[in-house]
Amino acid sequence: MKTTLSDAHRLALLAAHEAVGDRRFDEASRLSREVLNENSHEPDALNDLGPVALAGRQYPEALAMFKRFASLDDSDVLLFMPLGVVYAMSGFPQKAIEPIQRA
């Protein structure tokens, strides 16, 4: 799913993604949530918030973010791998099987 964002929010997404990579999770969360305030279906923002929640061991929130991310385009099987991983990390290995098999 392609979304339309302002230039400022495109830059915020780039900065958020970089912050996730550098493990600056508070900054990544703030920037990604700013983008989601403009467009609640922005896949890159949802994808960045998943690892942020995982890093904080906030498994229910991580699961919610990855479910939203995976639901945006169920034809893109690569979107399902993070969902399977978070199920496994959350203590639901049986639920992890289906999304990982789809990926």
Image (tube, rainbow, N blue to C red):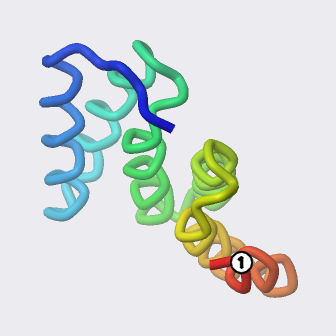
Relative to 55, 63 lies left or right: right
User: Residue 23 lies in what quarter of the image?
Assistant: bottom left
User: Residue 14 lies in what quarter of the image?
Assistant: top left
Relative to 52, 66 lies left or right: right
- Does 81 sit above or below residue 55? below
- Nearer to the camera, 5 or 60: 5
Label 1: how many Cα within 10 Å (few below 14, some 14–19, many 20+): some
Q: Name the residue under label 1.
A: 102
Relative to 53, 77 lies left or right: right
- Does 98 sit above or below residue 14? below
The percent coordinates of residue 73 (x first, y second) are 62, 48
Residue sitting at x 69%, y 54%: 74
- Residue at the extreme front of the image, as rendered: 75
Quarter of the image with the C terminus in it? bottom right
Residue sitting at x 26%, y 31%: 31
Residue sitting at x 41%, y 26%: 3
